[in-house]
Amino acid sequence: MKPMAGMTISEKILAAASGKDYVRPGEIVDARVDMAMVNEITGPLAIQTFKRIGLKNVWDNQRIVLVLDHQVPADSVKSAELHKIMREFAKEQNIPFLYDVGDGGICHQIMVERGHVRPGELIVGADSHTCTYGALGAFATGIGSTEMAAVFATGKLWLKVPSTIRINVTGRFSDFVTPKDLILDVIGRVGADGAIYKAVEFTGPTISEMDISGRLTLCNMTVEMGAKTGIIEPDEKVIQYVRERTNRPFKIFRSDEDANYERTLEFNVDNLEPMVACPHSVDNVKPVKEVEGVEINQAFLGSCTNGRLEDLELAARILRGRRVKKGVRMLVTPASSEVYLKALEMGILEVFVRAGACICNPTCGACFGGHMGLLAAGEICISSSNRNFVGRMGSPEAQIYLASPATVAASAVEGKITDPRRFLGGA
């Protein structure tokens, strides 16, 4: 009998979650979920649907995480009511993991930072950027609110096993060139619809050298190619990161040498330049030098893509001793309370305030056009977030350019889109 080909890390995790020895792309599996997450935008509908099912208790109150992050503090009575639904559900179900206003931050940062993500697990979240957690070697994917209600009830979810696109990365980043520039380059090449329902697996020596923050950025934006998940094999950096945050056991999976990939794409970052995704599509990617000089009204630093301490540190290198250009407003949103506190202790927030930036509480508000930093018609924003489609951050007549924290900071100082490498060797 001909032996079966090896499996990718994604296939192995889904096989384990469904009690199988082997799965192949296209196969439908009924998988056991390890952790489930909702925020206050998607959670109330999941909760209401769960209650209509008629069950008294969720399948496991230790495996559900509730995060208030999109419109916090509440900006309207409607928002306050959504928050109330989340709080009451946590109390009813005795769910210990409710991250409320002032005690958390952006859901995807909270999930990894507070130890709710472990290698080898199947994690679902009612938010499309749940794929972020693949940076820690988990299979993580976004689902709908009604699907989440079924997970709350049963702890299971059926999934189609995705085929895998491998992104192999070599070379060393130049100063002020970042993983954000790499993922923009990847999306520009693959296309916004080039990885629909695929797993995108990042490999290669550059990935091995990359810190956890950079890996989270890569996996976060795989959904912008249409991917089901982004994933990276866990190494000692990941194992140490996870063990510092949880004492729960986990299992390491790695792709077999003879695993089948749909295709492998090669990227070398030695000569990679700062990249920008131009309006109004995340795959409309160009080197920053091709759009330098475009005047901006707003610069946004934050989001689940680039609101971590490393991102704030990088931007502060440029802003230290400088001022945001008059006529430009800069918003800075640390991804979590922990990031906020560390940036405060390190003096990074002082750099931003002295530069004339506005420091916001940890929230998704500005990124998704919720309740802060909205753009007026005709305004232009350069943002470290993940989406730039029409109306994303306010007026449908505004324009959003996506870039790295370094490019955002440099552009804020100059008042126009600027290559951050112009600031090498500066203050």
Image (cartoon, helix red, strand yellow):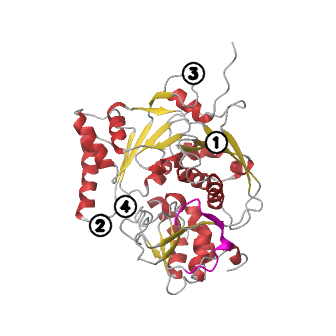
Q: Give the class, few, some or many, for how many residues have Cα within 10 Å of label 2's Cα (few <14, many ≥20).
A: few
Name the residue type under label 1. Ile
Horizontal arrangement in the rendering, residue 45 relative to residue 343 (left or right): left
Tell me the kind of residue under disc 3.
Asp
The quadrant the N terminus occupies is top right
Q: Nearer the viewer, mark 3 or mark 1?
A: 1
Which of the two discs, 2 and 1, sits closer to the camera?
1
Q: Earlier in the sequence, mark 2 or mark 1?
A: 2
Q: Position of residue 284 (x, y in %)?
A: 59, 63
Pick the residue in front: 280 or 251: 280
Magenta extent: 280-295
Residue in the picture at 52% in, 81% down: 354
Where on the picture, by quarter, is residue 173?
bottom right
Q: Residue tagged by mark 3?
A: 21
Whichever of callouts 1 and 4 sits on the residue coming sooner in the sequence is: 4
Q: How crowded is mark 4: few (under 14 residues within 10 Å), some or many (20 or more)?
A: some
The answer to whether residue 98 of the structure is visible from this angle is: yes
Q: What element carries label 1?
A: strand
* Residue that numbered label 4 is attached to: 102
N-terminal-most mark, 4 or 2? 2
